[in-house]
Amino acid sequence: MFQTRRFLTENFGNAPGLLSFMNAYQAPTPKLAAADKWFQRASVPSEWLPVVLSYLEIDNGAPISLIPYLGGDNA
């Protein structure tokens, strides 16, 4: 399993942090209520995940490793 909640929390902290990050790049953003659900449900919709990963890549100057988030519970 992919540890979605851990991925979100470690990279953005919370839903407002995710929106702030995306807004810094003038990227499309989900509504705050939708982003809150991502954290609550530990699930990012498939149409949003590549967008989020792409902006993390821009921010880091290289793709981020997803390996640390493999395995274990989705917590």
Image: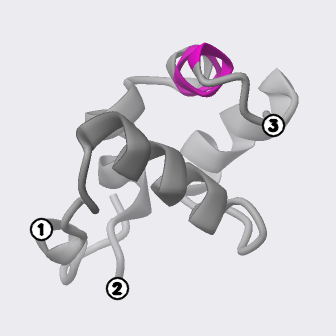
| Residue labelled with disc 3 | 28
On screen, residue 39 above or below 71: above
Look at the image and say whether residue 23 sits in the magenta stretch: yes
| Residue labelled with disc 1 | 68
Q: Which residue ends up furthest to the left in the rendered image?
A: 68
Q: Nearer the viewer, mark 2 or mark 1?
A: 1
Is residue 13 found left or right of 44 in the rendered image? left
Q: Amino acid at mark 2?
A: Met
- Structural distance between the alpha carbons of marks 2 and 1: 11 Å
Is residue 6 found left or right of 20 in the rendered image? left
Q: Amino acid at mark 3?
A: Pro
Q: Quadrant of residue 62?
A: bottom left
Residue at (55% x, 27% y) in the render: 18
- Screen quadrant of the N terminus: bottom left
- Screen quadrant of the C terminus: bottom left
Residue 70, position as x, y percentages in the image:
21, 80
Q: Which mark is residue 1?
A: 2
Which callout, 3 or 2, points at the residue further toward the start of the chain? Answer: 2
- The span shown in magenta is 18-24
Residue 43, position as x, y percentages in the image:
60, 62
Mark 1 residue crowding within 10 angstroms, few (<14) / some (14–19) / many (20+):
few
Which callout, 2 or 1, points at the residue further toward the start of the chain? Answer: 2
